Amino acid sequence: MVNKSKQKGTSTETLVVNYLRENGWRHAERRALSGSLDKGDIAGVPGIAIEVKYGNGTLKIGPWLTETGIERLNARADHGILVVKPFGMGEKNVGSFYAVMVAADFEALVAKAAAASSPMFVVSGQPGPYSARTLATEIAGSLRTLHLAPREIFALSLKPPGTKDKPERWYRVMTLHHMTRLLRAAGYGDPESVEVEAFS
C-alpha cells in the first residue's frame, strides 16, 4: 500500500531539487536516508542543510526548524534552511515555496551577502506575530506591492509565541526564489551570471 504522505514528501523534494539544479546548484539531489544522523533532504548543496516539508493545512514551522537545526549540526553546514511547499502550490510555483530560517542564522547569511563584491540587500517588513495565515498573506501581498531593485530581495520577520524579547529566535521567511538569490550572493552555488529581475 502506498504511503500518500511519504509520496507527497518525495514529490516535493524532487520539485525543490529540480529548482535548485536550474538556479545555481547543478549537482543537487535527494539525499539517501542516513539513519539517526539526518543531514537534511537534499545533497549537493555544499555548506547548506535543507529540510523540505509538504505543507498541508497546518504548518509546524517551530518543530520543523528545530529539525532543520539538528540536521545542520549533523551535516556540519554553515546554514540550515527549511523549505515548505504551501498548500495549493505545485510545480509551476516552486520559486514561491517558503524558505524559512531562524533569525540569528539568517542575519549571518545576510551579512555575507552584503559584504560580497556584488552585494544583495534584504528588504524587511515590520516584525509581526506568527500565524500561517499571516505568513501567506504578508509574503504574497508584499511581493505584489513592493518595487524591488535588481539587487534587493524581500524577507518577512515573524515572532512565534514566547519570543517577543528574543529577536534571534524569530522566523525569517522568504520565497525559495529570493533565498536562492541570497545564497548565491553570499558565495554558495554558482553566482548569478546576469542581473535577475525582482520576482513577484
Image (cartoon, rainbow, N blue to C red):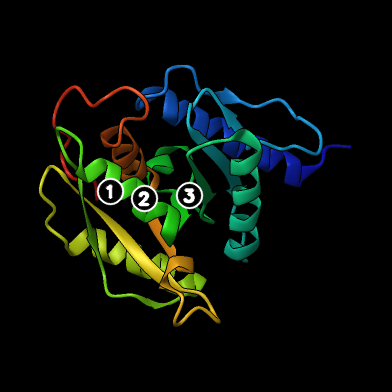
- Percent across and percent down for residue 79 are 48, 43
Q: How many labels does the image show?
A: 3
Front-most of residues 74 and 172: 74
- Percent across and percent down for residue 156 are 34, 64
Which residue was labeled with disc 2? 108
On the question of residue 59 being in view, the answer is no
Front-most of residues 21 and 164: 164
* Label 2 close to label 1 by CB (< 8 Å): yes
Which residue was labeled with disc 3? 89
- Of circles 2 and 3, the one toward us is 2
Residue at 19 percent of width and 22 percent of height: 193
* Label 2 close to label 3 by CB (< 8 Å): no
Query: Which numbered disc, 1 or 3, marks the residue that appears first in the sequence?
Result: 3
Q: Which amino acid does label 3 sit on?
A: Met
Quarter of the image that includes the N terminus: top right
Which residue was labeled with disc 1? 111
Label at residue 53: none
Please indicate whether residue 70 sits to the left or right of residue 172 in the image: right
Query: Which numbered disc, 2 or 3, marks the residue that appears first in the sequence?
Result: 3
- Of circles 1 and 3, the one toward us is 1
Residue at 66 percent of width and 41 percent of height: 9
